[in-house]
């Protein structure tokens, strides 16, 4: 504790002596003199006080200045390096000699000519909802959470209307709705009455202010938020992006608007209709691998004001009204009616047959030829799947991130070519691979700890069986084969654990090495036998058909002499075909489940 400021050469000092002993001098103070004058002009700047240091063998300085001008208080903390400073209060420029200069504003200013970083490990709140005179507690954002709750309810209501009107085929739980509710709950948090978690308030209760249950960034404004950039703005999320407005949402561009999605576009207007106009050039609608339907409760009109209307089909054009049909096929024109067939014309001509040639447009093939999903249901069946995240890296370096679906599977990993990928799967907010957590009361060096952790890692591999060969109840076991020498070289971590007779999936092993959980302190599973369903290619037009089998998985959390060893999943798979069907559940699993085995197969969407 204390303050140290060593006098610099050239400063005038006061020398005193302990007990008057001339052999025990000490410097008791420093004085101003013509060579070391006060910082600012006196007596005009008598309201300024503080600390200022000078760069050693340089000209720059650091300073803390308090300005006690009546009604215009301010504090300035400043470093001349890259003009970095924090100004609080009635902000007035303070020059090195003249002192107070021009008025610059009120409030606070944090500025620098260098880089600026705001980092908060547990979350961050930026808001213009004021708390005058620091009323309330620091994280009090009641207005913000109320608006978020209202927006979430509105979003859910609009989605439900789209579902009820059959524009959206999924149920409400399969949409973004549940995740928006979880986010609101995370922003609101859950208050704690644990004495160890909180501090006593004026009522004698212990309450850890609950907002920001996880590392959310919350930005809110009493009026508006303007976001602008001279160059590009990129908004991205590994999960969802939701926009909710009680009035209009407007998008304009001086160039082009492009929307490209993987799993469908749904647009629903509850009233006032939908209009799509092109001021110039064409409007094109294509269903490149499906049907194009136009359905209306009332009239359907197709009008050309200056050109023609052409209906082309290589098979059939059929017009039906009641029990009457006009059918046009390559074989001819056929009219069927239970009533009157009347034709009026100024002249009737029946000539010899003729044929019209036409060319159909070539539609591109939008389907990527290769896809795969990674199935880890059996490993995490006791946990909420939306708490499990994955990161996949393809051989080309592309990263795919996300969370497991309700079946315990990753999203579909698609590729234009056959390639391998590495995938890491585990609990959110935990480290990948091996991680050692030392006990707090251990007093050992980093070298000792690193050496011990290496030994513990080897023990985890050798003694605890963190790798086991692939098992399957499928009839496709002939696909399993012995590992190659190249695989041993590529994955040396397995050589301590595997026997040459262990079996692999084709030329690729199913799991690289396995797993412990750092999520549940009471978790001590010895082994979970995985029931692995085969992934089988069903499309006849894809020649690279493959079956996909996966190895047993194992979950461990082992205590050692000096701490706790965690290991997270690291898997290996390949994209060598297109998955159209796979074993899933009669009904989706969600949350914590009580059975590690799937019961019966069902189909999934293509």
Image: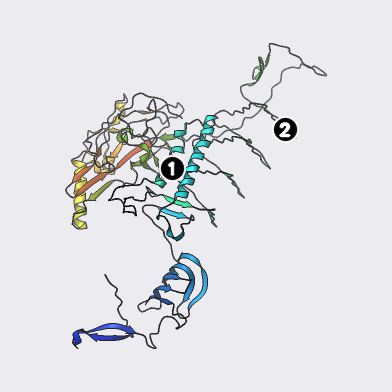
Q: Marks 1 and 2: CB-CB under 8 Å?
A: no
First in sequence: mark 1 or mark 2?
1
Q: Position of residue 556 (x, y in %)?
A: 24, 40
Q: Is residue 471 above or below residue 6?
A: above
Left or right: 596 as drawn, with respect to 541: left
Q: In the picture, which quadrant includes the N terminus?
A: bottom left
Left or right: 471 as drawn, with respect to 144: left
Residue at screen point 49% across, 56% down:
128
Which residue is at the far right? 346
Q: Which mark is residue 304?
A: 2
The residue singled out by tag 1 in the image is: 239
Q: Position of residue 11 (x, y in %)?
A: 33, 85
Please tell me which residue lies in front, 235 or 174.
174
Q: Position of residue 376 (x, y in %)?
A: 33, 35
Would you identify the image quadrant in which residue 96 lies? bottom left
Residue 264 visible at all = no
Residue at screen point 58% across, 45% down:
249
Query: Within 10 Å of the Cα at label 1, are there few (<14), some (14-19), or many (20+) other Cα atoms?
Result: few
């Amino acid at each position: 504790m204390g303050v140290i400021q060593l006098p610099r050469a050239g400063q005038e000092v006061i020398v005193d002596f302990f007990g008057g002993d001339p052999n025990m001098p000490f410097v008791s103070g420093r004085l101003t003199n013509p060579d070391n004058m006060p910082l600012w002009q006196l007596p005009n700047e008598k309201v300024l006080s503080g600390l200022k240091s000078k760069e050693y063998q340089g000209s720059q300085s650091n300073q803390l200045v308090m300005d006690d001008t009546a009604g215009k208080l301010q504090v300035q903390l400043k470093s001349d390096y890259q003009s970095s400073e924090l100004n609080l209060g009635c902000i007035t420029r303070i020059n090195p000699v003249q002192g107070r200069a021009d008025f610059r504003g009120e409030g606070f200013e944090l500025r620098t000519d260098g880089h600026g970083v705001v980092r908060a490990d547990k979350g961050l709140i930026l808001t213009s909802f004021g708390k005058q005179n620091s009323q309330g507690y620091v994280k009090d954002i009641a207005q913000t959470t109320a608006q978020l709750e209202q927006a979430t309810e509105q979003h859910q209501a609009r989605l439900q209307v789209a579902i009820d009107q059959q524009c959206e085929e999924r149920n409400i739980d399969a949409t973004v709705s549940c995740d928006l509710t979880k986010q609101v709950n995370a922003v609101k948090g859950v208050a704690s009455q644990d004495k160890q978690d909180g501090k006593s308030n004026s009522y004698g209760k212990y309450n850890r202010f609950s907002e920001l249950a996880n590392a959310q960034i919350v930005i809110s404004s009493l009026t508006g938020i303007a976001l602008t950039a001279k160059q590009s703005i990129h908004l991205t999320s590994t999960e969802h992006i939701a926009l909710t407005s009680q009035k209009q949402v407007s998008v304009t561009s001086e160039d082009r608007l492009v929307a490209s999605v993987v799993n469908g576009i749904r647009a629903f207007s509850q009233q006032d209709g939908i209009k799509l106009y092109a001021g110039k050039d064409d409007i094109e609608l294509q269903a490149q691998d499906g049907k194009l339907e136009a359905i209306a409760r009332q009239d359907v009109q197709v009008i050309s004001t200056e050109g023609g209307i052409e209906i082309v089909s290589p098979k059939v054009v059929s017009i039906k009204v009641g029990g009457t049909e006009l059918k046009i096929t390559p074989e001819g024109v056929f009219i069927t009616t239970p009533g009157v067939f009347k034709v009026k014309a100024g002249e009737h001509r029946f000539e010899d047959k003729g044929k019209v040639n036409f060319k159909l447009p070539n539609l591109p093939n939008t389907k990527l030829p290769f896809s795969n999903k990674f199935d880890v249901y059996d490993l995490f069946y006791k946990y909420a799947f939306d708490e499990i995240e994955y990161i996949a890296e393809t051989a080309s370096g592309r990263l795919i991130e996300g969370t497991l679906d309700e079946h315990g599977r990753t999203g579909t990993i698609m590729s234009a070519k056959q390639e391998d990928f590495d995938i890491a799967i585990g609990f959110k907010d935990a480290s990948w691979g091996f991680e050692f957590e030392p006990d707090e009361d251990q007093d050992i060096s980093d070298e000792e700890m690193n050496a011990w952790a290496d030994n513990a890692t080897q023990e985890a591999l050798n003694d605890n069986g963190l790798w086991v060969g692939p098992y399957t109840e499928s009839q496709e076991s002939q696909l399993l084969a012995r590992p190659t020498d190249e695989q041993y070289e590529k994955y040396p971590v397995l050589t301590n654990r595997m026997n040459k007779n262990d079996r692999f999936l084709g030329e690729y092993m199913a799991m690289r090495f396995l797993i412990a959980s750092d999520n549940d302190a009471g978790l001590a599973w010895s082994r979970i036998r995985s029931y692995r369903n085969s992934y089988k290619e069903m499309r006849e037009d894809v020649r690279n058909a493959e079956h996909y089998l996966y190895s047993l998985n194992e979950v461990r959390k082992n205590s050692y002499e000096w701490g706790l060893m965690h290991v997270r999943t690291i898997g290996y798979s390949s994209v060598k075909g297109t998955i159209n069907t796979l074993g899933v559940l009669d009904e989706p699993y969600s949350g914590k489940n009580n059975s590690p085995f799937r019961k019966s197969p069902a189909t999934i969407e293509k």
